[in-house]
Image (spheres, rainbow, N blue to C red):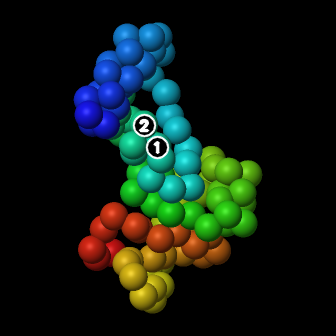
Amino acid sequence: MKQQLRELRNKILRKRLKNRDFTIIANNCLAGCIYHDLKLRFDTPTVNLYIPFPDYIFFLKNLKQLVYAEFTEIPHKACPAGLLGGGDSCVFSSLSEF
């Protein structure tokens, strides 16, 4: 029942959506969930990433530079993680390796 209601909601949202060409910059998997529900291309540089809050604000302020920056792998207990541009930390929450 829950799944059917969610699919109905998503269908209504897809019909109401006028602009299909947009980017969501999220600090967690929310962007991927929205793109998936709307059946849109995952058009975001932050898909499957978790960026801790202070680093996320820094990322947003420096988006034009950091979106093209290199990742440096760092140790993390649960899943792969890296530093973006030498300072921003990101956790690759949906990946098994860096």
Q: As rendered, which of 63 and 23 lies closer to the eye?
A: 23
Residue position marked by numbered label 2 in the rendering: 34
Q: Where does the image place residue 89, in percent across and percent down from the top left?
A: 58, 72
Q: Position of residue 49 (x, y in %)?
A: 45, 60
Above or below 87: residue 51: above
Q: What label sits on residue 31 in the rendered view? A: 1
Q: Secondary structure at mark 1?
A: helix
Q: Circles 1 and 2: CB distance less than 8 Å? A: yes
Q: Quadrant of the C terminus?
A: bottom left
Front residue of this view, candidates 52 and 83: 52
Image point 42% across, 88% down: which residue?
Answer: 77
Q: Nearer the viewer, residue 85 or 82?
A: 82
* Mark 1 surroundings: few (<14), some (14-19) or many (≥20) residues within 10 A: many
Question: What residue is at 39 percent from the left and 43 percent from the top?
Answer: 33
Q: Is residue 71 left or right of residue 6?
A: right
68 relative to 3, above or below:
below
| Badge number at residue 79 | none
Which residue: 33% across, 64% down?
A: 94
Asked if residue 62 can be seen in this view, the reply is no
Q: Where 34 falls versus 78 (above or below)?
A: above
> As shown in the figure, which amino acid type bears the numbered disc 2?
Ile
Residue 80 left/right relative to 63: left
Instruction: Give residue 83's position: percent from left, percent from top.
Output: 54, 75
| Res 86 → quadrant | bottom right
Task: Measure the alpha-carbon separation of dots 1 and 2.
Answer: 5 Å
Give the residue drawn at x 38%, y 23%: 9
